[in-house]
Image (cartoon, rainbow, N blue to C red):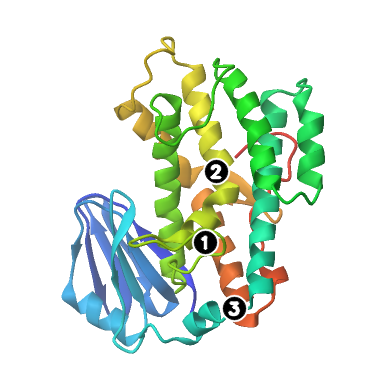
Amino acid sequence: MSYHIVNIDSPECSISCRNGQLTCRTQEGEKTLPLEDVASIVVTSFSASIHSHLLIEAAKKGISLILCDHYKPVSLVLPANRSTDTLLTRAHVSLPASIRQELWRRTVDAKCQNQYRLAECLAPESPWLQEMWRTVAGKHKNKESMCAREFWRMFGKAVGFPSFERHRDAPGINGMLNYGYAVLLSLCQQKLFAVGIDPTFGLSHTTRERSTPLAYDIMEPFRPCVDHLVIQWVQHVNDKEFLPIDKGFKQHILSLPLQKIEYRQHPMTLMRCVEAVVTTLRSAILGKRAAVYQPWIQQNSKWDG
């Protein structure tokens, strides 16, 4: 079976199956795709109609169906023969601590490099850049927090708030970042479910009730993409003392999945990149080889995430 992930986001659409073809009918017309080429179907449309025949045919072919509300997965429809005791889940749960730690190290390294690339674009003359690069290139125990401290200082100056501090519960720019990270988290949840990885077993983030720590882990290297979108928005706001999360800002942030980035020398959307990254994670878990996992790293000196 192929591992193509189909995302249905068209409003007022009807999804069904006819002659072995996945069909999506909208006011603009109808699109089809061979069901045998599909691994998962992610429905983010807020008003889609799903025919029961599709559910039956998808189950026969082992295809999962992920239903989302405001882009966040709220329901996972799995074929009866896909219990939670799968080869992938067993491999995930029994992953040696050394491999889990290496997967997390690779994730943190990617995040820190991406923060540095964005900081380099925001403040190319900053005296903090050299210190930040030494941290990025080193093997410090607190590497993630050390890079974050330098990054947020440069971020604050870029948006016109030199004394800015990152606080999850604070309003204003912090609230904007939180909204963007929520969109990113939902995207990572979608892709993890779509490739069959249980996101409740994390690499570093702690498992809590009704949480998906692995999605938080996977999203770390992509956070600078959200930071960049927030910077773009704030820099064009006249009244920086009043920064509401209004309709315009939400539309700006919701463009995140379609942002153009480069992954392993191939241009693609951020949505497709997350899918590619979680696919490498799946292979790393099954093969118990951390080196197979390839988190996204911004390679270009010019930030275009």
The answer to whether residue 286 is left or right of residue 138 is left
* Residue density around tag 1, few if under 14, some if 14–19, many if 20 or more, within 10 Å: many
Q: Secondary structure at mark 1?
A: helix
Q: Residue shown at 76%/35% (left/top)?
A: 132
Residue 227 figure quarter: top right
Q: Residue shown at 39%/61% (left/top)?
A: 208
Amino acid type at mark 1: Glu
* Residue tagged 1: 275
Amino acid type at mark 3: Leu
Q: Nearer the viewer, mark 3 or mark 1?
A: 3
Q: Residue shown at 59%/81% (left/top)?
A: 286
Q: Of marks 3 and 1, which one's residue comes earlier in the chain?
A: 3
* Residue tagged 3: 95
Which residue is the extreme one toward the front? Answer: 141
Could you tell me residue 233's position as x and y percent? Answer: 47, 24
Can residue 186 be seen in this snapshot?
yes
Q: For the residues marked 3 and 1, what is the alpha-carbon distance in whole angstroms?
A: 21 Å
Q: Secondary structure at mark 3?
A: loop
Q: Of marks 1 and 2, which one's residue comes earlier in the chain?
A: 2
Could you tell me residue 135's position as x and y percent? Answer: 77, 41
Which residue is the extreme one toward the top? Answer: 238
The image's mark for residue 27 is none
Q: For the residues marked 3 and 2, what is the alpha-carbon distance in whole angstroms?
A: 26 Å
Q: Secondary structure at mark 2?
A: helix
* Residue tagged 2: 223
Amino acid type at mark 2: Arg
Residue 74 figure quarter: bottom left
User: Relative to 119, does residue 96 appear above or below in the rendering?
Assistant: below
Q: Nearer the viewer, mark 3 or mark 2?
A: 3
Can residue 298 be seen in this snapshot?
no
Could you tell me residue 199's position as x and y percent? Answer: 44, 66
Residue closest to the eye, 48 or 297? 297
